[in-house]
Image: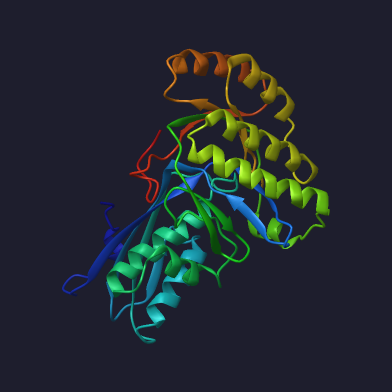
Amino acid sequence: MMELSPAARRVGVDLDEGTGEACGTFGELLQGVLPDGTAFLVTFPITLGTRAWFRYDPHGPLRVYPAHKTKSLTLARTMLDTRGPAGGGALVLDSDLLVGKGLASSSADLVATARSVGTVLGLDTSPAAIEDWLRPVEPTDGVMHPGIVVFEHRAVRLRARLGTLPPVTVLAVDEGGQLDTIAYNRHTRHVPPALTAEYARLVDDLTRAVARADLKGVGAVTTRSATLNQRRLPKRNLDALIRIADRVGAPGVVCAHSGTMLGLLLDAGAPDHDEALVAARAACERLPGTLSVYRSAAPSDSRESAGAP
């Protein structure tokens, strides 16, 4: 458990405490707009995430560490206010996720916060309840739900559960910079009917591929989604990464549709996984950007983060 800084301790005061965790997601397996006008994304849970620790103080102010995590502070205050205007405490967040890259760092912070504060206050922290807590704060990823889900991120509402995949490694290329997801999501776009119909077909294709544990089928959808996203937020390495995927036998590429990350999907259970990863890394080292490796969350840890890859 994370240690609270000495400055935040109140000797002699009886304080309740609780913890919560949430995984991040490597971009999205698919993101777009459906024929009914619903903006959606499909989560891709990874083992990295955020851990939150909350100590309740009925007599003190509410503080968050690090201090810039103001959205988590706002959420904690809202939850505390259900018990009345008095009371505060210390909320400590520890995250593995890079900010502004498309890894759902903000969503993971908020979900972990809701779980830790809700545990202490005895509030409902089911996925549906967390949706309700987060909806007034910001559009968010569906990381409050276990496994891969189709999520209406603007409405903060679950659309469908798809299940889980066999273990996947992602060799990621970060093209640099940061993206403000909130500002990005403020800009609506016109999506023509032919494209919304294609997104609906891609959801169906992905649903079948996940149900069959068909990584090749998943990769076909993720690659197409990354290609379609070039119209909105282009990745300069996409064409090169698609060629590398073909060369090393990777199922496909996956992107952060509102972030700076692009990655190669690799079957972690394949006999030649290690060789494919080495070959892919050697090829990707020639591309502009920073390389890193991520692991998909297993069914047992897709609800909460489970350490570094």
Q: Nearer the viewer, residue 38 or 65?
A: 38
Picture quarter containing residue 156?
bottom right
Question: Which residue is most to the left?
Answer: 12
Picture quarter containing residue 151?
bottom right
**Is residue 167 depicted above or below 211 in this figure?**
above
**Residue 96's spot in the image, x, y percent?**
43, 44
Q: Dividing the image into 4 quarters, which one contains the C terminus? A: top left
- Horizontal side of 39 relative to 70 (left or right) equals right
**Residue 303's spot in the image, x, y percent?**
38, 51
**Is residue 292 depicted above or below 82 in this figure?**
above
Q: Nearer the viewer, residue 141 or 216?
A: 216
**Residue 19's spot in the image, x, y percent?**
30, 59
- Residue drawn at (62%, 46%), measured in percent from left and top? 204
**Residue 53's spot in the image, x, y percent?**
32, 59
- Residue 173, visible in the rendered structure: no
**Is residue 89 depicted above or below 116 in this figure?**
below
Number of marks drawn: 0
Colouring style: rainbow
Picture quarter containing residue 56?
bottom left
- Residue 63, visible in the rendered structure: yes
- Residue drawn at (55%, 41%), measured in percent from left and top? 208
- Horizontal side of 266 relative to 301 (left or right) equals right
- Residue drawn at (34%, 58%), measured in percent from left and top? 20
Q: Nearer the viewer, residue 92 or 129?
A: 129
